[in-house]
Image: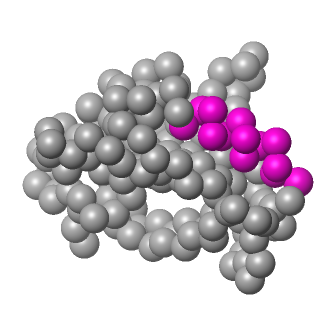
Amino acid sequence: MSFKKVIKEFKLVGLKGSGEFVNFGNEVPLLAKQLLSRSNEILNSTETEIALFEPKKNEEHRIGHYYVGLVVSEKLNEVPSGMDYIETVKSYVTTRGNISNLGVLHLNLLNWAEEQDYQRDLDSYIIETYHPMVEGEEEVQIYLPIQA
């Protein structure tokens, strides 16, 4: 498992959802299915699926919001009804691996960031991009925002 620090720009069009953090694992894929059923409406789509997650700030923070979307190749002036255009450039620590190991990937990335003395940016979205592999497998790239 490799980790690194990057400065990365994301442009996406997506749907916003919200709910309890503990339910994100079920809710996010459902909203992603809705989004994919409307993917033909999104101009300049790269077909790369992306999700943005509000970070959980503490134990009392139970409800959060998220976006599921598609990366777009350039800024859009018009987006489909009910969708948002989001553009962000930040410093992140990142890792990539099989989506079946999502929890372990997040934990290892958090631990590595801490060991490197990176400070988490709890006011910026945690970002995941999804990459289909052969035989139905899928990889996820995690971008954890840090203070620049």
Q: Nearer the viewer, residue 20 or 131?
A: 20
- Residue 54 in percent (x, y) is at 36, 53
Tell me the quadrant of the picture where the N terminus can be found: top left
Residue at left offset 71%, top offset 36%: 33
Q: Where 51 falls versus 82 (above or below)?
A: above
Q: Is residue 48 left or right of residue 130?
A: right
Residue 73 among those drawn in magenta: no
Camera-side residue of 65 and 141: 65
> Dividing the picture into quarters, in which one does residue 92 lie?
bottom left
Quarter of the C terminus within the rendering: bottom left
- The percent coordinates of residue 116 (x first, y second) are 15, 51
Q: Is residue 90 visible?
A: yes
Residue sitting at x 42%, y 51%:
65
Q: Return the residue found at the far top.
A: 135
Q: Position of residue 74 (x, y in %)?
A: 72, 75
Overall secondary structure of the magenta section: helix
Q: Which stretch appears magenta?
A: 28-40
Does the stretch in magenta take in 39? yes
- Residue at 69%, 54% (x, y): give it: 70
